[in-house]
Amino acid sequence: QVQLVESGGGLVQAGGSLRLSCAASGRTFSTYHMGWFRQAPGKEREFVAMISWIGTRTNYTDSVKGRFTISKDNAKNTVYLQMNSLKPEDTAVYYCAARRNIKGPYDYWGQGTQVTVSS
């Protein structure tokens, strides 16, 4: 069982930066592949970024490439999402998620943290 708690969201002006954190409980966190998703009002949840359990493989949705960076600190049981050059269209609730199989569905989800980017 893995429990995920996101933090670091808030209100920021366009062009600004935020760093989201996702703290995980459970001794086997280091073996999980992690992802970040977001859901804007009236829209479906969408994939943002993922990182493999050891941190050697990452993937991003096109709209955030070059602006967002996902990282994982297994010693701290934490995954991060560094968001730079934020745009109003990045406004959403951001969720982290964990899965054992890199090609399978995500097994665990956090409760989400709100990110609002003003123009």
Image (cartoon, rainbow, N blue to C red):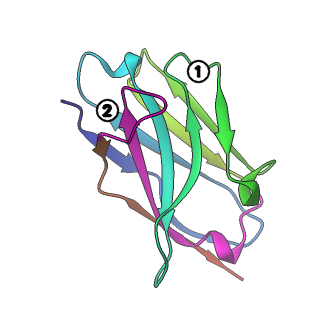
Residue 115 seen from this side: no
Vertical side of 110 occupied by 33: above or below: above
Residue position marked by numbered label 2 in the rendering: 24
Q: Is residue 87 found inside the magenta-colored segment of the image?
A: yes
Which image quadrant: the C terminus?
bottom right
Of all residues, the one furthest to the right in this rendering is 66
Residue 74 has which mark?
none
Q: Position of residue 96 (x, y in %)?
A: 42, 47
Distance between the alpha carbons at the discs numbered 1 and 2:
16 Å
Q: Amino acid at mark 1?
A: Gly
- Left or right: where 65 falls relative to 45: right
- Left or right: where 55 falls relative to 16: left
Residue 55 has which mark?
1
Tell me if label 1 and label 2 are in contact, CB under 8 Å: no
Vertical side of 32 occupied by 47: above or below: below
Region in magenta: 85-107
Q: Position of residue 22 (x, y in %)?
A: 41, 41
Q: Nearer the viewer, mark 1 or mark 2?
A: 1
- Left or right: where 86 falls relative to 20: right
**Residue drawn at 29 percent across, 17 percent down:** 28
Mark 1 or mark 2: whose residue is earlier in sequence? 2
Q: Quadrant of residue 18?
A: bottom right
Vertical side of 84 occupied by 59: above or below: above
Q: Secondary structure at mark 2?
A: strand
Q: Position of residue 89 (x, y in %)?
A: 66, 75
Q: Position of residue 12 (x, y in %)?
A: 62, 69
Q: Amino acid at mark 2?
A: Ala
Q: Is residue 33 found inside the magenta-colored segment of the image?
A: no
